[in-house]
Image (spheres, rainbow, N blue to C red):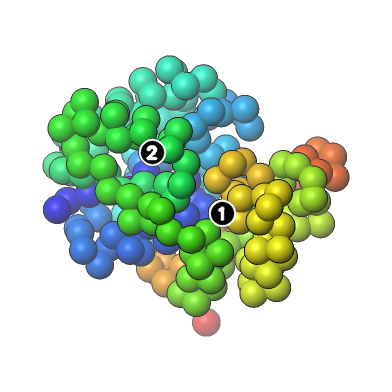
Amino acid sequence: MRVAVLYSGGKDSNLALLEASGEHEVACLITMKPQSLESWLFHYPNAHLVGLQAEALGLPLIERECPDDEAGGLRALKEALRAAREVYGVEGVVTGAVKSSYQAARFAAACGELGLECVNPLWGRDEVELLEEVVRRGIEAIFTRVAGYPLSKALLGRRIDREVIELLARLKPYVNPSGEGGEYETFVLDFPLFRKRIVPLRWRVEGADYDAVLVIEEARLVDKS
């Protein structure tokens, strides 16, 4: 099946892409660019850099700006899905949803309206096991947002590694280890399917200790060594 990948640039959408590429033909990426961190549906931090990731993957990218509210976000998503269907002939859409019924139900409904199959390769899997797979499969994902105690801005820019996984596993009673509740967000700098890796050149941190964002102001692609 020819598919589009709903792609935020974070760890879950990249892992979903990797899983889907083994079974389907990935025709394009779809990235939604909300107005702010208050988006109900979509990943915000560093969405402006997804074009570099698409270039590293060698895949065409459909980008759509969208309002933060649910209704506006879904309208923009359906517009992007129509474009993917008409331009690239996709029959399905891959998402990185893990256990968020809120997102999964709305994405599935949007796909269903357009006659597209919604594919969720990560759905229902244990969040800690998925983090371990991120590390095992060589996905270099860094924290770009923390949103709530006990996660602090000391994590910003840090790569997800085994030590971080142990921390998130211990915090499981308080924090969704996958970050699907908005507790944190990530950005992928390197990935097995990337032809080149991304190197941040300039960045800044905004916000308070337990609600902060790492904004990558400039980055470039470099050859993998």
- Which residue is the site of mark 1? 178
**Label annotation for residue 105:** none
Q: Position of residue 121 (x, y in %)?
A: 33, 56
Q: Is residue 157 left or right of residue 94?
A: right
Q: Position of residue 124 (x, y in %)?
A: 41, 53
Q: Is residue 136 left or right of residue 46?
A: left
Amino acid tagged 2: Ala
Residue 112 appears in the picture as rendered = yes
Pick whichever, 169 or 95, lies toward us: 169
Q: Quadrant of residue 30?
A: top left
Q: Secondary structure at mark 2?
A: helix
Q: Position of residue 32 (x, y in %)?
A: 44, 35
**Label annotation for residue 104:** 2
Question: Does residue 22 lie above or below 211 as drawn?
Answer: below
Q: Secondary structure at mark 1?
A: loop
Q: CA distance from mark 1 to mark 2?
A: 15 Å
Residue 58 appears in the picture as rendered = no
Question: Does residue 54 lie above or below 33 as drawn?
Answer: below
Q: Residue at x 52, y 82 (%)?
A: 225
Question: Does residue 223 lie above or below 59 as drawn?
Answer: below
How busy is the neighbourhood of tag 1: few (under 14 within 10 Å), some, or many (20 plus)? many
Amino acid tagged 1: Ser
Q: Residue at x 67, y 61 (%)?
A: 168
Q: Position of residue 49 (x, y in %)?
A: 53, 47
How busy is the neighbourhood of tag 2: few (under 14 within 10 Å), some, or many (20 plus)? many
Q: Residue at x 81, y 38 (%)?
A: 207
Pick whichever, 8 or 215, lies toward us: 8
